[in-house]
Image (tube, grey):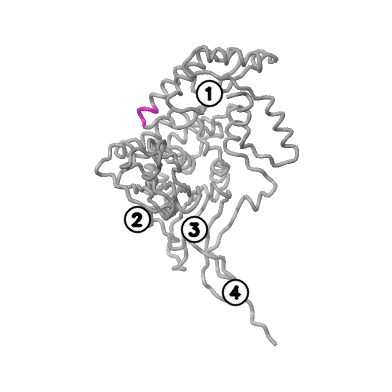
Amino acid sequence: MTHEEYLDRVTHYIKLEREDDQALLTKFKTLLHYQAGSYDQDEAYQSLDKFIKENAESTMSPGQRNRVFYMALPPSVFVPVARGLRRNAYATDGVNRIVVEKPFGKDLASSTALAKDLAQLFAEKEIFRIDHYLGKEMVKNMMTVRFANIFFSHIWNRMYIDNVQITFKEPFGTEGRGGYFDEFGIIRDVMQNHLLQILSLIAMERPISTDAEAIRDEKVKVLKCIPTIDVRDTLLGQYTRNGDKPGYLEDTTLTNKDSLTPTFAALVLWIQNERWEGVPFILKAGKALDAAKVEVRIQFRHVAGNLYKNAARNELVIRVQPDEAVYMKFNNKLPGLSYQTSQTDLDLTYGNRYVDLSIPDAYESLLLDVLRNDHSNFVRDDELDAAWRIFTPLLHKIDQHDADIKIATYKYGSRGPDALDGFVKHYGYDRSHAHYDWPVQSVLPKTD
């Protein structure tokens, strides 16, 4: 690329929302530089090192010459690039940090090998494995909701919670990325990383502090309590044509037209510890579904000896995207002369409550964390091992087309496979009051 082409590429999607944003963008461009080079040549990294010293560090004092290397690259070149950077462009009079984008391997063995190779080049404290879901506002809010509210801390266990669902929906299919997606599938793409990270924040014990390592210690502990996923606790699917919307196998970039790669998965994880024994954590994710949504739905048990037989279960819902919100579904007497029970909610929708606050993009938040040297929202090496251990046996069965693996179909734009409602019901989810309307109070008749 030319320098101008580079500037256009990196600033093309920056949103200008205020009057002075254009001036700020122009100023920002003066800070950007482009240096071309090959991944596998020491000379390229030596040129990069020289360029940084002459253009960025020449006015800095020793000890201030800190470098962040962000590797938004194919996994196949993670190690060669890290090796080239460590050998030729490693700061000698400042700190070094290296940011690695997922996927962090394809299974436990490949992830462990990658971690081992990186560990020979950079210290663990220098490595930031970025999962952008940990930068999302509502994911970062989960610890506050759990540990800063006493009424949640006492009911956050198997005595009161019946089941937990973590749902990820995309309303579009692979759309020309089938060749790439087929190598990973929906489980590797979003469940082993994004959704499992959310689960760990919901299920972990209270850390001794908000220190990054204290938080990550507790996440690792809870992940180690989860056994590998049983095939009997899975529902896998692949979307098919619906009208003018093509099915997954019709993607022109997909070479394997007999692919059994799931584009939808519902998986049940069990946490074998005192707090969560017997509570199913249902992870659901899919492409070409009926909506765009990521949410956590915690459904509580029925009230024991309930006087009101038709009362719905309480639910705490944390909507990660779109339109961030936290709301509690609860039962209330219908206003007026009736004693009918009505389901309603205590609603904290961010767009209504925090009208003058801007929520940063997840990457904005995480990049700032890198600069601050805050590892709280990044994945540690042992955490990655614990996560892959849970999923690897199931992934290998899918890859090998094991006879136990069944792939259902669902139409593009639907809620998923037809068996989905029965699947979640089997694990205790009560959907009888899933949809409700705000009651409208009747008015007195007019008199003459």
Please tell me the numbered disc located at residue 314.
Answer: 3
Residue 148 visible in the displayed image: yes
Q: Which mark is residue 336?
A: 4
The residue depicted at 45 percent of the width and 65 percent of the height is 306
Q: Which is more N-terminal, label 2 or label 1?
A: 1
Q: Residue at x 54, y 55 (%)?
A: 328
Judged left or right of residue 429, residue 61 is right
Question: Label 2 belongs to which residue?
Answer: 419
Q: CA distance from mark 3 to mark 2?
A: 25 Å
Residue 110 sits inside the magenta stretch: yes
User: Closer to the camera: disc 3 or disc 1?
Assistant: 1
- Secondary structure of the residue carrying numbered label 3: loop
Q: Which residue is mark 1?
A: 98
Asked whether residue 289 is drawn in magenta, I would say no
Q: What's the amino acid at mark 3?
A: Asn
Q: SS for tag 1? A: strand
Q: Sequence-wise, which precedes: disc 4 or disc 1?
A: 1
Q: Residues within 10 Å of mark 3 (few under 14, many from 20)?
A: many
Q: Are marks 4 and 1 in contact (CB under 8 Å)?
A: no
Total numbered labels: 4
110, 76: nearer the viewer: 76
Q: Secondary structure at mark 4?
A: loop
- Find residue 233 and report its horizontal and vertical position in percent: 33, 47
Q: Residues within 10 Å of mark 4 (few under 14, many from 20)?
A: few
Crowding at dot 1, Cα within 10 Å, few <14 / some 14-19 / many 20+, comes out as: many
